[in-house]
Image: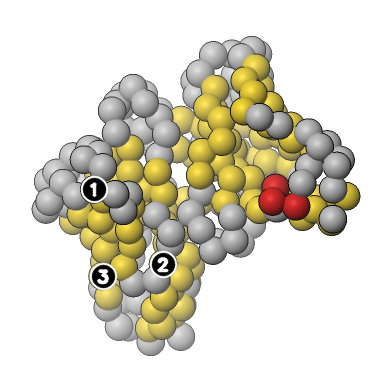
Amino acid sequence: NAGVTQTPKFRVLKTGQSMTLLCAQDMNHEYMYWYRQDPGMGLRLIHYSVGEGTTAKGEVPDGYNVSRLKKQNFLLGLESAAPSQTSVYFCATKGQPSYNEQFFGPGTRLTVL
Amino acid sequence: GQQLNQSPQSMFIQEGEDVSMNCTSSSIFNTWLWYKQDPGEGPVLLIALYKAGELTSNGRLTAQFGITRKDSFLNISASIPSDVGIYFCAGLSGSGNTGKLIFGQGTTLQVKP
């Protein structure tokens, strides 16, 4: 089992470019989350999904879009990247509603110039 | 919105020393979680707390759910070099089954052999 994987691991973009980050999980979890991690600020929730075909906004959703067309995949899109979106992005998944542990992927380091 | 204040921000200790860190909030949380993040990796769950006043251990780690439900503490006894990393507290946010977590800013731990 690979658990939670993220693609790519690193990416450099120019301002205004677009890209999609892929999160894939093989744990059959219903819940998936996208976070960004910035120095001194912990992890902040961007968007999340409680099941296939559903998405919802988190704490810092502006400038990002997401899609959950398949249960195992959660995509995070940046339509027009800005330097403020330079960050490390983590995907996480969770199984049953009553079980609160989130399992994290290894992260994607994104730099926007 | 809900916020968690985690302290200290960083610690530099000698191997063998005990470590204490805490998390406080102005809001009540019904679940507290403690995660550790190794360099270049995603966070991994250390301890989960579900009841006010609960004291839970995991090896050399002990965590407590504050009686007011607005704080939590993590202690590491007899630190070793592999304890190095960033420790995050997280509180389960809101009602329902979204599983949304609010993270503290993190405590960076460095251990000198």
Disc 2 crowd rating (10 Å Cα; few below 14, some 14-19, many 20+) is: many
Say which label, 3 or 1, has the lower sequence index: 3
- Identified at 68% across, 41% down, the residue is B6
Find disc 3 in the rendering and name its residue: A20
Label 3 SS? strand
The amino acid on which the numbered mark 3 sits, given as a three-letter code, is: Thr
Left or right: residue B51 compared with residue A27: right
Residue B98 appears in the picture as rendered: yes
Q: Amino acid at mark 2?
A: Thr
Label 3 and label 1 in one chain:
yes
Closest to the observer, A24 or B113? B113
**Which residue is painted at 47% across and 65% down in the image?**
A88
Q: Chain of mark 1?
A: A
Residue A37: image location, x then y, percent: 51, 58
In space, the residues marked 2 and 3 are separated at their CA atoms by 11 Å
Which circle's residue, 2 or 3, is located before the other in the chain? 3
Q: How far apart, in angstroms, are the residues tagged by discs 1 and 2?
A: 19 Å
Residue at (26, 42) in percent of width and height: A27
Residue pictured at 33% horizontal, 43% vertical: A93
Around disc 1, counting alpha carbons within 10 Å, would you say few (fewer than 14), some (14 to 19), or many (20 or more)? few
Query: Residue tagged by mark 1?
Result: A26
Q: Which mark is residue A108?
A: 2
Q: Is residue A81 left or right of residue A70?
A: right
Q: Position of residue B2 (x, y in %)?
A: 52, 36
Q: Amino acid at mark 1?
A: Asp
